[in-house]
C-alpha cells in the first residue's frame, strides 16, 4: 500500500468522525422505516434520522443488534420490527405495526442486502435465489406494501443500491445483476409514483466499511489496490451514506426523483485505469 494511504481507522482526518450531520433537517414528527438497520449503513442511517428528531422503525432479523442500533434514544420514538426481508408475511406485519404505532409513514429506506461471491461455473440456484430475493424481490414487495402510506403524505422511497449496479465486478455477477435491476426498478417506480407526490431515489455506495468488508480492508495489499480507484483517497463510512440519505429524503431534494446517486469517493468517475504512482496523499 502506498505511503500515507488510508486505513479504515483514519476517518478522523476526513471529518467523518461521529454521527451527527453538519446540516439540520426538519424530521421532527416524521416517521422513517430503515431495513437492515442493525449494522453498517442501516445502523448509521437509523441513528442519523433519530438525531434529526424523526421517529424511526428499525427492521432486521436480530433483536440484539437492532436494540443496540437505537440505544441512547427516546424509546417513544423507536419501533423495533423483527422480520426477514424475504418473508412476505413478516414484512406485512411490520408495515402494519408501524402504521398502528405511529399512524403514518413518511420515509422508507430499503437498505437490507445480501452478497454471495459468484462464478458462473460454480454458482447454484439456491445462491441466486438468496441474493435476488433480498436485493430485488424484497424491495419490490416493500414498495408495494408501503406505497399507500407514502401516498397519504407524499413521502419518499429510498433504496440503498451500489455502484456494483452500474458496472461489473470480478466474481460478483449475481450481486451486480440484482443491483442493476434495483436501479432500473427505482427509476421506473419514480415515473409511476411521481404524480402522487412520492419521490423515489437510490444511493449507490462505493466500497464502504462494514462487517462484510472489514476482512478485506484489513489486507494492506487489497486496500492499496482499492485506493487506485478512489479519488478521495479513502474508503467510505456508513455515516457518509447516512448523510446523503438525510438530504435525499428531505425537502431540499423536493425536485429530485428517479436518481441513482453514487456516494463512492469518485470511484465511478474512473475508467478503471490505476492512478499514477506517487499521487497518494
Image (cartoon, helix red, strand yellow):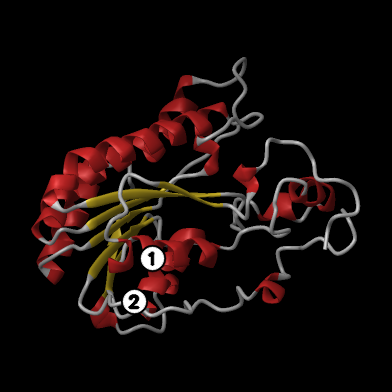
Residue that appears at 32% across and 38% down: 187
When the figure is inspected, residue 79 is found, relative to residue 138, above or below; the finding is: below
CB within 8 Å, label 2 to label 1: yes
When the figure is inspected, residue 55 is found, relative to residue 195, above or below; the finding is: below
Seen in the image, is 34 located left or right of residue 220?
A: left
Seen in the image, is 159 located left or right of residue 44?
A: left
Give the image location of residue 138, x and y in percent: 31, 40
Seen in the image, is 108 located left or right of residue 161?
A: left
Local packing at callout 1 (Cα closer than 10 Å; few below 14, some 14-19, many 20+) is some
Q: Which residue is mark 2?
A: 25
Give the image location of residue 113, x and y in percent: 44, 45
- Which secondary structure, mark 1? helix
Q: Which residue is mark 1?
A: 247
- Quarter location, residue 269: top right
Residue that appears at 52% across and 35% down: 166
Q: Nearer the viewer, residue 29 or 70?
A: 29
Residue that appears at 52% across and 60% down: 40
Amino acid at each position: 500500500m502506498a505511503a500515507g494511504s488510508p486505513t479504515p481507522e483514519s476517518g478522523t482526518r476526513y471529518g467523518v468522525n461521529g454521527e451527527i450531520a453538519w446540516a439540520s433537517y426538519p424530521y421532527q414528527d416524521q416517521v422513517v422505516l430503515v431495513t437492515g438497520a442493525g449494522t453498517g449503513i442501516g445502523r448509521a442511517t437509523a441513528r442519523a434520522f433519530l438525531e434529526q428528531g424523526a421517529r424511526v422503525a428499525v427492521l432486521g432479523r436480530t433483536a440484539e443488534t437492532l436494540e443496540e442500533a437505537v440505544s441512547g434514544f427516546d424509546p417513544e420514538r423507536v419501533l423495533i420490527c423483527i422480520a426477514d426481508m424475504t418473508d412476505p408475511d413478516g414484512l406485512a406485519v411490520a408495515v402494519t405495526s408501524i402504521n398502528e404505532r405511529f399512524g403514518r409513514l413518511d420515509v422508507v429506506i430499503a437498505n437490507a442486502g445480501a452478497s454471495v461471491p459468484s462464478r458462473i461455473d460454480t454458482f447454484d440456484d439456491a445462491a441466486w435465489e438468496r441474493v435476488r430475493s433480498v436485493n430485488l424481490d424484497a424491495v419490490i414487495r416493500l414498495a408495494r406494501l408501503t406505497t399507500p402510506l407514502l401516498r397519504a403524505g407524499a413521502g419518499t422511497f429510498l433504496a440503498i443500491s451500489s455502484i456494483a449496479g452500474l458496472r461489473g465486478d470480478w466474481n460478483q455477477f449475481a450481486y451486480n445483476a440484482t443491483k442493476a435491476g434495483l436501479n432500473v426498478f427505482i427509476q421506473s417506480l419514480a415515473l409511476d409514483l411521481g404524480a402522487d407526490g412520492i419521490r423515489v431515489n437510490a444511493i449507490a455506495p462505493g466500497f464502504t466499511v462494514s462487517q462484510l468488508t472489514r476482512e478485506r480492508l484489513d489486507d494492506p495489499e487489497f486496500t492499496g489496490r482499492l485506493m487506485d480507484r478512489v479519488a478521495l483517497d479513502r474508503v467510505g463510512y456508513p455515516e457518509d451514506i447516512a448523510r446523503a440519505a438525510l438530504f435525499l429524503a428531505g425537502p431540499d431534494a423536493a425536485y429530485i426523483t428517479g436518481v441513482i446517486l453514487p456516494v463512492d469517493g469518485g470511484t465511478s468517475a474512473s475508467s478503471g485505469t490505476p492512478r499514477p504512482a506517487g499521487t497518494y496523499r
